[in-house]
Image (cartoon, rainbow, N blue to C red):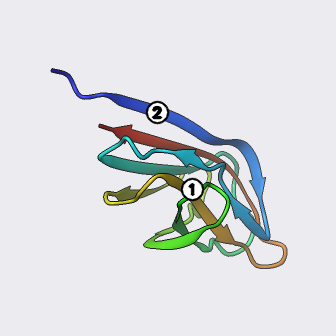
Amino acid sequence: MLPENITAIVARNERWSGEAASEPYEAGWAREAIFFVRALKQPLGRAPTAWVEISPDGMRWVREGTELAMPDKKDGIAVARLSHFGNWLRVATHFDNGAECTVLVTLHLKA
């Protein structure tokens, strides 16, 4: 039997600044998850650290513990690999004043 896989785009061409997060995605059926965060334009200011958040209901969020450095150049890609994550997933970060990044965030899931 072939494993079930899906790629979900959870942020597309979004300009992230200040407090930012991807759309939540319900992934409880998956065994593995990988987030890819790509900078579609040259980021402005210092590239912050992003983190993975999990949720029991898609509304209340807790840091899962996995962190990733946001891309610091155009077409740069950051990656976070996960397992044991419950049901809902998203990526969040906080940019300093004046800093921003236009992102494409994809979530790759495997059963």
For label 2, count other residues whose C-alpha is less than 10 Å away and answer few (under 14), some (14-19) or many (20+). few
| Drawn side of residue 94 relative to residue 111, left or right | right
Image location of residue 30, percent across then percent down: 35, 42
Q: Residue furthest toward the front?
A: 57
The label on residue 90 is 1
Above or below 14: residue 71: below
Mark 2 = which residue? 7
Image location of residue 7, percent across then percent down: 46, 33
- The number of numbered discs placed on residues in the rendered structure image is 2
Image location of residue 74, percent across then percent down: 62, 51
Quadrant of the snapshot with the C terminus: top left
Give the quadrant of residue 49.
bottom right
Q: Residue furthest toward the right?
A: 98
Quadrant of the snapshot with the N terminus: top left
Mark before the other along the chain sequence, 1 or 2: 2
Q: Amino acid at mark 2?
A: Thr
Above or below 49: residue 38: above
- Mark 1 lies on a secondary structure that is strand
Q: Are the residues tagged 1 and 2 within 8 Å (C-beta)?
A: no
Q: Amino acid at mark 1?
A: Arg
